[in-house]
Image (tube, coloured by chain):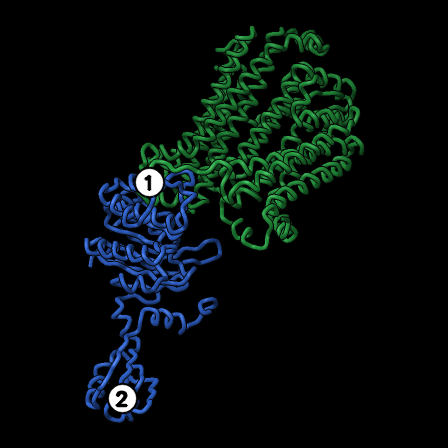
Chain colours: A blue, B green
Amino acid sequence: MELVVRIEGLVKSFGSFAALRGLDLRVGRGEVHGFLGPNGAGKSTTIRVLLGLLRADAGRVELLAGDPWRDVVGLHRRLAYVPGDVSLWPGLTGGEAIDLLGRLRGGVDERRRARLLERFELDPTKRGRTYSKGNRQKVAIVAALASDVELLILDEPTSGLDPLMEAVFQDEIAAVKAAGRTVLLSSHILSEVEALADRISIIRDGRVVQTGTLEQMRLHTRTTVTAALTDDPAGLDRLPGVHDVRVDGHRLVCSVDTEHIGAVMVELGRRGITAITVSPASLEDLFLRQYDNEPTAGARP
Amino acid sequence: MMVGFRPLFAVTVRQDARNIAPWIVLITALSASSILAYSWVFPDPASRAALSVAVGANPAFSLLFGQARDLSTAEGFNAWRTLALGGFFAALMAIFTVVRNSRADEDSGQAELVASGVVGRHARLAVAVAVASLACLVLGVVSAAVTVLFGGSIADSAALSATYTASGLVFAGVAAVTAQLGSYARTATAMAVSVLGVGYLARAYSDTIDPDGPAIWFSPLGWTAQVRPAAGNNWWPLLGCLGLTVVLLAVANVLLARRDFGMGLVPPSPGPDRGGAVASVWGLALRLHRGSMIGWTLVFVLLGVVFGYLSTTLGGVFARNADFAAVLGARGGSAADLTFAFLLTLLTVLGIIAAVYGVQIGMRFYAEELEYRAEPLLAAALARPKLFASHAVIALLGPAAALLLGGAVIGVTSAAAGGSAGAADLVVQALAEIPAVWVLIGLSLALIGAHPVARPAAWLGVVAAFVLTILGPMFRLWDWILGISPFWHVPNITTTNPDYLGLLWLSLLAAALITTGFAGYRRRDVI
């Protein structure tokens, strides 16, 4: 896999506060990579190092096979960025801001610009200070998507968007992905990441604690099985990998280690299935599990 | 209407104290230091008489500081040196405090949280004005107490300090009005500071042309001058200041009731849907600074006209003034020399104002970064040096052009009114000031580029240059201290053999500072 982002052992401190403590991150070409973590885990700091805004204290950072601190201009021609909290020039209109950012990046695709403005229902003649939070966000999204770049770096891009616009956004990112472009999508909206991401990295306290596809992550989780059987479900709890068994007449609810799900299915089939629901762990389960296992201050409500 | 005033007031005072304290320290230090320095620098009647002659012979001094009524006592000297300047700084303190706590919070959205709470419509402005008024009162008390402590007489020091409080109060009222008119905090501040500038200039004009004539009553800063601390202590003009403050506050509250939250009285209009010229780094920088560039250029034209016109009226001033003859007798100069000395001082003042202009552009550049607007630009294919350059060029060339324009306008106005100063000489002299101006602006660029936490030191540099250049010689400071100010190294180009070597050193220093800024900005973290 050709790597677009390769970070190894990245350390960044602000005074005595260590924001990143040895972070590793790999994003392959053409993938949508979900970058997950709660507030303050170090997502934005990582992105700002990738953008060459912050200088790494230690570790190796490679972006599009270049050094993000030194090869700023060359690299930035090939990427577009949407911050999570867009600050617009109060006196400039949205259209002016889009053109400014687009032209700095090396040009705007006119047709795409017009199409995006329409899809996102954005009025480009309003001044920066009169836009709402969601509309400011749209300005940055349109500016980023209107330019033809290899890599999109999106830092919580949909904060403030309404559900309709959120759907439009997901649609556009799917098109970007279909065109073979790479997306680094930092987010804490799990459904968005679940819908879009090929691979996911979960960050916690300045380190990536888990990375992989959703399927790979599910390997270490349990699948919830709800079944109604013709036979008596007794004894199923003695099968390897079956936990939390609850029996109510012929109905059974249990959770099963994902690696044993096949054997359990065979055993259930032998007892005659009349109805069954199998739900793999959702990203939310994964995420909560990651943060529940080793609770740290502030990570739990 | 005033629900929520008390808790909001308490929080604001606690938060804003650190912004206000430096002004109080600065003004108090101005006042206390002149008392302290006077007996030390001018120990005997002969040196005091010499001071009177020196001040009397250059009308630039009465233009800048007001009339010197009695320089034979420490209190009289203090009243002359600090009344106008202290009042000016007090007014700035009040303007910044009012706008910061009313208008600026609306721009940042912080006020929305407050306004949504149980807070009356008028409470936020009332809090801002109350905090500014409290600051003015504390300033008066502290400055009077410290000045007395350093040996000033109680009645004179109290009268002088009361003029600071009065100037501050009036301009708190002015700022309360402009905060309702402008669409942004920056506009509101610019409007209030313009009013202050015009008020100062009106007082200066009157003090130069017709001291104590009717024109002095045009400006509230003239009213405070009429208090005449240490030369009569005439308290009643202060009542006028209080009355004007009350009227201004009433106007502000009427306007407040008529505008929408977060907007000025002029609603924002839609603009172009395409980028055009603004869609480049240079275009953006020009657009961001356009307002201040126009404003400052107007300031220099106005000052040029006033200074140029005043230079042609000096004949009358000299004729009235006995000191003039004394200086001519002692130095053997001519009236033309004295006129050029007057203009030289004013050109230096213009140079310092040009430095303020440049430093302000630099600070605005950093404010953009603080508001997270450098980030999206640098995330595009834009090299940091180019972004820095787009603002640095404006910060350096804008003030230089304005200064040259100011010099030219002085020359033209003076010539049109039949003055003796040559326009060419004035432009060349203004040109010679530019390296010194660039040293001060370069300092701000170096700090903003390399170590922005320390950027207030750039303002300190401007204040130090002003104090050392304009007041330093009067205090007969040593050359090596006076030489700290870059303007000390600027030659008088009308002398027979001007020493241009100083300009070379200034240029090298400015280049080094600007380079430091560039190098630092490449290397540091961007917010």
Residue corresponding to mark 2: A239
Identify whether B294 is placed above or below A282. above
- Which chain letter goes with mark 2? A
Judge whether residue B40 can be spotted in this image.
no
Q: Residue at x 49, y 35 (%)?
A: B444
Residue corresponding to mark 1: A95
Q: Residue at x 31, y 52 (%)?
A: A153
Q: Quadrant of residue B386?
A: top left
Judge whether residue A207 can be spotted in this image.
yes
- The dot on residue B29 is none
Q: Residues within 10 Å of mark 2 (few under 14, many from 20)?
A: few
| Count of all numbered marks drawn on residues in the image | 2
Q: Quadrant of residue B199?
A: top right
Residue B305 image position (x, y, % from top left): 54, 16
Q: Residue B179 or A211: which is nearer the viewer? A: B179
The kind of secondary structure element at disc 1 is helix
- Which chain letter goes with mark 1? A
Identify whether B80 is placed above or below B410. below
Residue A1 image position (x, y, % from top left): 20, 59
Q: Residue A136 or A178: which is nearer the viewer? A: A136
The kind of secondary structure element at disc 2 is loop
Residue B332 image position (x, y, % from top left): 65, 6
Q: Residue A207 or A38: which is nearer the viewer? A: A38
